[in-house]
Image (spheres, helix red, strand yellow):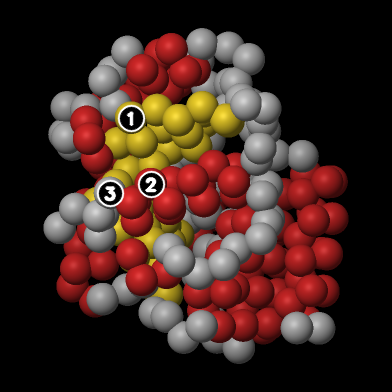
Amino acid sequence: MNVLIAIPAYNEEGRISKLLDILVKKYPKENILVIDDGSADRTYEEAKSFGVKVIKNSPNLGKGESIKKAFKYALDHGFDAVITMDADLQHDPSDLPKFIAKFKNEGCDLVIGTRWHELYKMPFLNYISNRITTMILSLLAGTRLPDTQSGYRLYSRRVLRLKFTQSRYDFESEVVFKIAVAGFKVCGVPIKVIYGTGISSVDKVRDTLRFIKLALKFLWR
């Protein structure tokens, strides 16, 4: 099975090197793609130095657009699935085999890394936000969904051609909703909870407003 590890990155100098140093020792370099989303630091140069495939957005386009580029790359190069993980070291590479095993053994089209088994490690506001957004998306989709705000995910090739319109962090809500509504199988696997490794690029107010707008759009679809 041929799986692409896709890493959207924005101003992750230093952290991207630590992540890639781990990944290239365990996975083929041709199976690793970094999408530098218009970074102003040396993220691009550091990623290139590891010999993995690197795409650079100019200017910054948003996490959603970066992941859509990863989807296209996977389709064009014959990958069976895409695993997305953050570049800021909040996603533990040792959890990667769990996603692949779930995909192979249960035929899941979307596997989401869930963090709720370690709630005590999650900042309170993050926990509240995740619970509320996951509840809303589950109600709108008509099915119980796992941790919908987790960016650590596996997407099967079958869902990569679905049409997604959002470009920023609201993309991760849109993609879960549309995959579930289309009748594809959504699964969850427990992952380690790691915080405090870097500065988040999420704008809580702006991205919350984007989610509300997206939820209303789903409601009136």
76 up-or-down from 20: above or below = below
The three-letter amino acid code for the residue at tag 2 is: Tyr
Q: Residue at x 57, y 30 (%)?
A: 57
The three-letter amino acid code for the residue at tag 3 is: His
Give the secondary structure at mark 2.
helix
Q: Which residue is mark 3?
A: 77
- Please give the label number shown on residue 206: none
State if disc 1 and disc 2 touch (CB < 8 Å).
yes
State if disc 2 and disc 3 touch (CB < 8 Å).
yes
Mark 1 or mark 3: name the one nearer the start of the chain. Answer: 1
Mark 1 or 3: in front is 3
Q: Is residue 35 left or right of residue 155?
A: right
Rounded to the nearest whole Å, what is the CA distance between mark 2 and mark 1? Answer: 10 Å
Q: Mark 1, residues whose alpha carbon is within 10 Å: few (<14), some, or many (≥20)?
A: some
The three-letter amino acid code for the residue at tag 1 is: Lys
Rounded to the nearest whole Å, what is the CA distance between mark 3 and mark 2? Answer: 6 Å
Rounded to the nearest whole Å, what is the CA distance between mark 1 and mark 3? Answer: 12 Å
Q: Residue at x 49, y 45 (%)?
A: 69
In this rendered view, identify the residue nearer to me: 111 or 130: 111
Mark yes or no: residue 192 visible: no
Give the secondary structure at mark 3.
loop
Mark yes or no: residue 24 visible: yes
Residue 215: image location, x then y, percent? 76, 71
Q: How many marks?
A: 3
In this rendered view, identify the residue nearer to me: 22 or 177: 177
Q: Which residue is mark 2?
A: 73
Mark 2 or mark 1: name the one nearer the start of the chain. Answer: 1
Q: Residue at x 24, y 40 (%)?
A: 31
Q: Is residue 18 left or right of residue 123?
A: left
Q: Is residue 161 left or right of residue 10?
A: left
Residue 47: image location, x then y, percent? 38, 20
Q: Dividing the image into 4 quarters, which one contains the C terminus?
A: bottom right
